Amino acid sequence: MQFDKAKATRNLDRKLTQLRGKSYISSELIDLLDAVAHLQLEARTEAEVTLPPDAEQPPAEALLQGVPLVTRECFPHDPAQAAKLLSKLVALLDAAGGPLGQAARTVGKALDSGEMTPEELFRRYLGDDATFFASWTERTPGAPKALAFLASAALGPSLEAAAGQLASRLPSAKVAPSGECPICGSLPLISSLKEKAGFRHAVCSFCRHDYRIRRIACPVCGEEDQKKLTYFTVDEEPGFRVDVCESCKTYIKTIDFRALDRVSLPVLDDLDSLALDYVAAGQGYKRATLSAWGF
């Protein structure tokens, strides 16, 4: 499906307007996310990716059993477009000031001096190099996730573009055999209930692919015993619930806007429902993935 920038921009602006009504999200943060998201939309129209040959992908039988289409470290992306966006994002965070601005200046100096190249940063991110990013938390203690956020935000548009094209190569199975993304094998960021029947979909935490998963099953460990699966809601956050698993003690937030006149943008829905993360953590559950914004 071709990317519709105009529609995406309208939905983004509508969602941002809603987020500005949240008392626990600062206007400074919303302004920053507003700028980042609009830069990403512009970059999404510029992203050009080259997919691997069909012959290199796993056979259909393996895909139906849960083998991902492409591994994360080999995921197609547009390095030139991502490097261009990275430069803009570093400047944006620098101008924001505070700990985030200080971290951006540290990253910018490393890029300008050649100590670190955009290509190396992207390779480390795609390879999920925890040791590399941990070393940067020490260099940017005021904003320890800044470098990971910059890498993720810069690569995001071309990763999404690639995922959109790769989706056509997936077998026609209606429900993924596990909670992991059928394209890259990553865990979901958030899930949602769609259509009248309430089919459950997940959004990948890495490539943002939307895929259907089992409604009564933990997307992290696969637990199917209904006695070990439950959920809770809070009156202050209509349209959201938290699905928890007693076997692995993880949780995932689920969106159900079917009866509400609200636009759903999973990355921002995750921020919109931040209050539920605090409630879930207070009850002893943990997220299986970071938020879309690195926390």
Image (cartoon, helix red, strand yellow):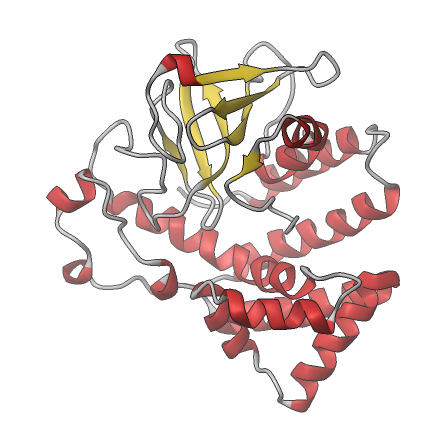
Query: What x and y, as percent, mark residue 188?
Result: 45, 39
Figure quadrant of the N terminus: top left
Residue nearest the observer in this picture, 288 or 151 = 288
Image quadrant where residue 212 sits: top left
Residue 81 visible to the viewer: no
Which quarter of the picture shows residue 45? bottom right
Residue drawn at 12 percent across, 50 percent down? 59
Q: Is 156 positioned to the left or the right of 111 in the image?
A: left
Left or right: residue 14 versus residue 74 is right
Residue 31, given in percent of the width and then of the height, sits at: 82, 47
The answer to whether 70 is drawn above or below residue 1 in the figure is below
Where in the figure is residue 253, as x and y percent of width and height? 56, 28
Determine whether 21 is above or below 60 in the image: above
In the picture provided, is 67 more to the left or to the right than 127?
A: left
Residue 122 can be seen in this image = yes
Q: Position of residue 84 (x, y in %)?
A: 61, 72
The foreground one among 236 and 218 is: 218
Residue found at the far bottom of this picture: 113
